[in-house]
Image (cartoon, rainbow, N blue to C red):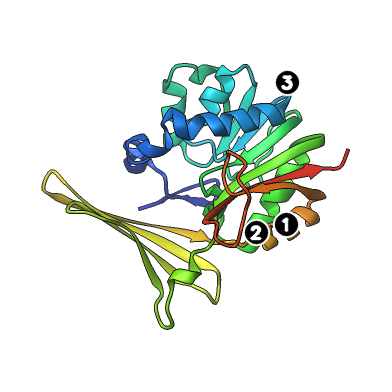
Amino acid sequence: MPVTVAGVEDYFGESVAARYDESSAEMCTPEAVNPVVDVLAGLAGGGRALELGIGTGRIALPLAARGVPVCGIDLSPAMAARLRAKPGGEAVDVTIGDFATTRVAGSFSVAYLVYNTIGNLTSQDAQVACFRNAAAHLKPGGCFVIEVGVPQLRKLPPGQTVVPFALSATQWGFDLYDVSTQSMSSYHARVADGRGEFRAIPFRYVWPAELDLMARLAGLRLRSRWENWAGEPFTHESAQHVSVWEKAS
């Protein structure tokens, strides 16, 4: 069950944090991490970086190891504790709070949200607030970067609301969509050591054009959009995008 932190439900408590890196192992390889760090280090350009939803430090720690000063905001004390316990964790300043509204001191050259984390904000108002919060942290000319999937509604035939994403002898996962509210929930079932575990996490899916409008409301303009961190073109067949918005100089 989620706990409440700063008035917001935290779905990434100790039971999730304890195995988060293991369950996301494919996203923690050098092949997955290095292109992200390359882009963010380039955008930082010698300035500071702010990660919204910093988690266990998958991106923040290697970015800091490149010499980029990194701060972060995260709602989950359990996830932040995992980051702090890792080598180099003491160099990353983490503030516990809702990244849609929590402020940290100073200004930054780049702020970023990766791995679909914008969807953890489950209302349009919260997502708009996140853009405004990111923009308020940026220096003139600074950039806000989001990596997020394109909603997979093309996989839904008429009358269907469920898309499976994991299926094995010990693990099942599926996403449940409500297209009337742009809400979805990810359901995870797992059998380990003869015991069953189940958890559900709510999200709000969001379209690229909607994100662009949120950016405009926050005083940002679209600078780049790619399919991935390698900079491949974003097309109508892309399953995700990396978007960069810039604050006016």
Cα–Cα span, label 2 and label 1:
6 Å
Cα–Cα span, label 1 and label 3:
27 Å
Q: Is residue 226 above or below residue 62?
A: below
Residue found at x 51% / y 56%:
239
Question: Which x, y percent locates residue 243?
Answer: 66, 47
Asked if one can make out residue 225 in the rendered structure from this viewpoint, the answer is yes
Asked if one can make out residue 80 in the rendered structure from this viewpoint, the answer is no
Single out the residue that lies furthest toward the left.
194
Q: Is residue 214 above or below residue 156?
A: above
Which comes sooner in the sequence, label 1 or label 3? 3
Q: Nearer the viewer, residue 196 or 96?
A: 196
Residue under numbered circle 1: 212
Residue found at x 45% / y 31%:
31
The amino acid beneath tag 1 is: Asp
- Check whether the beta carbons of the residues at disc 2 and disc 1 lie within 8 A of each other: yes
Residue under numbered circle 3: 46
Question: Which x, y percent locates residue 147?
Answer: 58, 46
The amino acid beneath tag 3 is: Gly
Q: Nearer the viewer, residue 66 or 137?
A: 66
The amino acid beneath tag 2 is: Pro
Question: Which x, y percent locates residue 163?
Answer: 38, 66
Residue under numbered circle 2: 208
